[in-house]
Image (cartoon, rainbow, N blue to C red):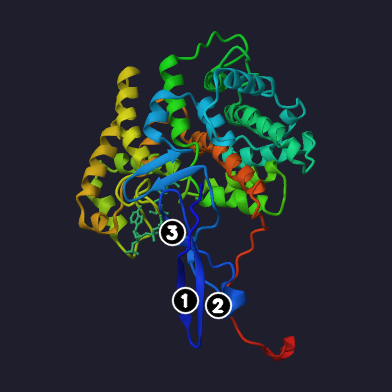
């Protein structure tokens, strides 16, 4: 699919001049291939935060941050969010094509068959303190999962590892919630679809509780998980690739991805947004005060859920979620003062010169927390929900990397700016 290209870029430095090949993506993005730069010139590149570095070639996700385009395997996110189920999107992302009916049936069957975790794993949950953050539990339990399953480093085993993770992480996520509120664990129910089963494991209070999954909530959660399912080389996906590049197993790479997602500058922002809105609400809805704080270079405060490394006009997921938040609250007959507050905050920020100049817009996390609240999901679980959605994306990134003919262990270079060589000073003379 990648175009052959005869063009090249010229780099001139001191007495050296080199032609560097260029790679053109299917959507026209051009990259200078610097793989031979150091061996030919002695130079390396410097790009803190990797904002300008293409770390791989990928066929999974296309983003155009200027125009607010997001596509999984060529399909527009708006269409997928409207028309597909989360399991269909999982299949699409991981295996590269929309499943036929029989393929989807087999895939969903495999997910149900593998949804139980080993009974002994329940003992691990018991060891965590009740107030443990569910992201810490999730990441630990995914690593623990690897001890219950053989993990030969053999591509013929990849499918089973992938199914294990897709099937069991939702059980682990629900159990981590049950553990935190002291309710009994509810086993996966093969009569329910993936998302319905997750809700059942979360909200059924006991095996005898006649809880029934609300179809409005199930549909809304399907949409949220689809919107979070993949987002190319972000912090957590790059972490998954980095860990996986040592040929460590899939479980350890995904566990590392969960840890990377947890931080407030990444997936942890969804919890941080709600906490920020609660704080502003408790402070008399004084939006201007918080906008001023976010603009103050002497304050660490940022408007959570605002800004994105790639989207510089709008995040298409945020637009879908803003509308979805209204629809879902209406359908459930709920009112949430935080939704009104979020909309007013968005309006103030979008009309403020500081945010306009820096092209800061609401991102996916700005409205997702309000929807999770409406679905009855507590804020400590928000980032776990993100992880559940992002799981197929991480897996696809790992699989693509392992199947890439250019596969190499990831190992960036650095520019050393420390002391040059100096003699050791004995402790008595320091
Ligand atoms: N509030 C106030 N100012 C901001 C914000 C914000 N949310 N985001 C960026 N800025 C400012 C920075 O202070 C900086 O200003 P300066 O040029 O005067 O120094 C400028 O905008 C550029 O910001 P960077 O931090 O360089 O942008 P970067 O691309 O590195 O960071 C990020 C992107 C981490 C998303 C950032 O916008 C942020 O911290 N947002 C809040 C946290 C958040 O919502 N994270 C979720 C991201 S989406 C996701 O991971 C799912």
Q: In which quarter of the image is residue 82?
A: top left
The residue positioned 62% from the left and 31% from the top of the image is 166
Give the Cα distance between marks 1 and 2: 11 Å
In front: 397, or 4?
A: 4
Q: Is mark 3 on a helix, strand or loop?
A: strand
The mark closer to the camera, 3 or 2, is: 3
Where residue 26 appears, x then y in whole percent?
A: 45, 48
* Lower sequence index among marks 3 and 1: 1
The residue where tag 3 is placed is 30
CB within 8 Å, label 3 to label 2: no
Q: What element carries label 2?
A: loop
Looking at the image, can residue 95 be seen? yes
CB within 8 Å, label 1 to label 2: yes
* Lower sequence index among marks 1 and 2: 1
Q: Quadrant of residue 280?
A: top left
The mark closer to the camera, 1 or 2, is: 1
Local crowd size for mark 1, using a 10 Å CA cut-off: few (<14), some (14–19), many (≥20): few
The residue where tag 2 is placed is 43
Give the Cα distance between marks 3 and 2: 21 Å
Where residue 302 appears, x then y in whole percent?
A: 36, 54
Q: Is residue 185 left or right of residue 427?
A: left
The residue where tag 1 is placed is 11
Where residue 146 appears, x then y in whole percent?
A: 74, 38
In front: 426, or 186?
A: 186
Instruction: Determine which of the numbered discs, if any, sits on residue 292 in the image.
Output: none
Q: In this view, does 118 lie to the left or right of 305?
A: right
* In the depicted structure, whether residue 234 falls above or below residue 394: below
């Amino acid at each position: 699919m990648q175009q052959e290209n005869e063009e090249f870029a010229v780099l001139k430095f001191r007495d050296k001049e080199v032609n560097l090949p260029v790679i053109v993506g299917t959507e026209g993005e051009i990259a200078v291939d610097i793989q031979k730069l150091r061996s030919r010139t002695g130079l390396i590149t410097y790009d803190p935060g990797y904002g300008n570095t293409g770390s791989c070639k990928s066929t999974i996700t296309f983003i155009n941050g200027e125009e607010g385009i997001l596509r999984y395997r060529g399909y527009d996110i708006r269409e997928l969010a409207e028309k597909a189920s989360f399991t269909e999107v999982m299949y699409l992302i991981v295996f590269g094509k929309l499943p036929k009916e029989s393929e989807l049936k087999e895939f969903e069957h495999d997910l149900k068959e593998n949804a139980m975790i080993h009974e002994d794993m329940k003992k691990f949950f018991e060891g965590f303190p009740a107030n443990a953050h569910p992201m810490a539990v999730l990441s630990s339990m995914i690593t623990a999962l690897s001890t219950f399953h053989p993990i030969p480093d053999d591509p013929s085993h990849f499918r089973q590892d992938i199914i294990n993770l897709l099937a069991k992480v939702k059980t682990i996520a629900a159990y981590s919630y049950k553990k935190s509120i002291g309710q009994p664990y509810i086993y996966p129910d093969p009569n329910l679809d993936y998302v319905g089963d997750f809700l059942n494991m979360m909200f059924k209070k006991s095996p005898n509780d006649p809880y029934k999954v609300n179809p409005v909530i199930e549909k809304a959660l399907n949409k949220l998980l689809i919107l979070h399912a993949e987002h190319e080389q972000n912090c957590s996906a790059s972490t998954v690739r980095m860990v996986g590049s040592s040929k460590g197993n899939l479980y350890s790479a995904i566990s590392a991805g969960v840890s990377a997602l947890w931080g407030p500058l990444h997936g942890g922002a969804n919890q941080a947004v709600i906490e920020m809105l609660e704080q502003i609400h408790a402070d008399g809805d004084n939006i201007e005060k918080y906008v001023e704080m976010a603009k103050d270079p002497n304050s660490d405060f940022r408007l959570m859920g605002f800004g994105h490394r790639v989207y510089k006009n709008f995040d298409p997921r945020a637009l879908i979620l803003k509308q979805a938040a209204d629809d879902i609250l209406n359908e459930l007959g709920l009112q949430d003062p935080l939704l009104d507050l979020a909309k007013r905050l968005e309006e103030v920020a979008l009309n403020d010169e500081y945010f306009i100049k820096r092209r800061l817009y609401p991102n996916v996390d700005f409205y997702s927390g309000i929807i999770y609240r409406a679905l009855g999901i507590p804020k400590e679980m928000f980032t776990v929900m993100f992880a559940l959605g992002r799981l197929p994306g991480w897996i696809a990134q790992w699989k693509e990397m392992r199947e890439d003919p250019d596969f190499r262990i990831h190992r960036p270079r650095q520019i050393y700016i420390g002391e040059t060589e100096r003699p050791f000073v004995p402790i008595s003379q320091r």
